[in-house]
Amino acid sequence: MRAGKTMAEQAKNGKNQEPLVVGRLHKSFGSQKVLNGVDLSVARGETVVVLGRSGTGKSVLLKLLVGLQQPDSGSIRIHGQDIGGLGMDQLNEVRKKIGFLFQQAALYDSLTVEQNVEFPLVRHTTLSDAERGKKARDLLASLGMEKDLNKMPSDISGGMQKRVGLARALALDPDILLFDEPTSGLDPITAAEIGQLIVKLKKERNLTSVVVTHDVHGAKSFADRMVLLRDGKVVIDGTFVQLEKSPDPFVVQFLKDAA
């Protein structure tokens, strides 16, 4: 079983090369302790799925990784840079390397599909209008959305909205991609298609991905590793087969309930 390395272990071995490394992460909201010493490292091109019961801190972990929230203690390193304490300008530079697909896609209702994908290019690049448009159209075409450029988010299905959100997340060519419940609320066929897209992106772009999901069995198709959280700690970190073979009562019950 592959366990996440602590920052001290990585420093000792001189191998702190993973694009994303979390060390002894703690986060509480008032008296509620959400994360309680989480260690996690994700290698280049690896897809790690984070599992756990509702309220375990999975989505909080993603928000911490992009600096939307701050940990109480511990460290988050993106390409070797500790993002803790960075100024907003520095943090925004780091964020350009990270794509984020929100649970509800979080598209702008007043913008068309194409304009939604162009939005980060307008904000963060010096590309011309023509260059931005071409890049947005190419991204949407790669995700099967080339016929829906001028539609509004309200005119397309939930699965299509996820594809547009994914295209927008890829607009700045990130090398780390975060997914918050990418198949939530989708029918089984559409959910499987989203899983196939995750595999496709890994092959084509060698992306480092962290996927938070409740869809344990759907995640088998794209996960290199699965990390199960309980009470703010990592219970097990390994392949799906290793989870299936675990004698830990919580792991056994979690997989049974997810069946």
Image (spheres, rainbow, N blue to C red):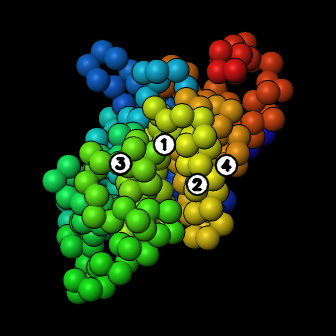
Instruction: Tell me the amino acid under the disc marked 2.
Output: Ile
Q: Which residue is mark 3?
A: 156
Occupied quadrant, residue 256:
top right
Residue 222's mark?
4
Instruction: Please report whichever mark, 2 or 1, sits nearer to the chain's N-terminal start.
Output: 1
Q: Secondary structure at mark 4?
A: loop
Q: Quadrant of the N terminus?
A: top right
Q: Are marks 2 and 4 in contact (CB under 8 Å)?
A: yes
**Residue lying farthest right?**
245
**Residue lying farthest left?**
110
Q: Is residue 37 visible?
A: yes
Q: Is residue 42 visible?
A: no
Q: CA distance from mark 2 to mark 4?
A: 7 Å
Residue 198's mark?
2
Q: Which residue is mark 1?
A: 182
Q: CA distance from mark 4 to mark 1?
A: 12 Å
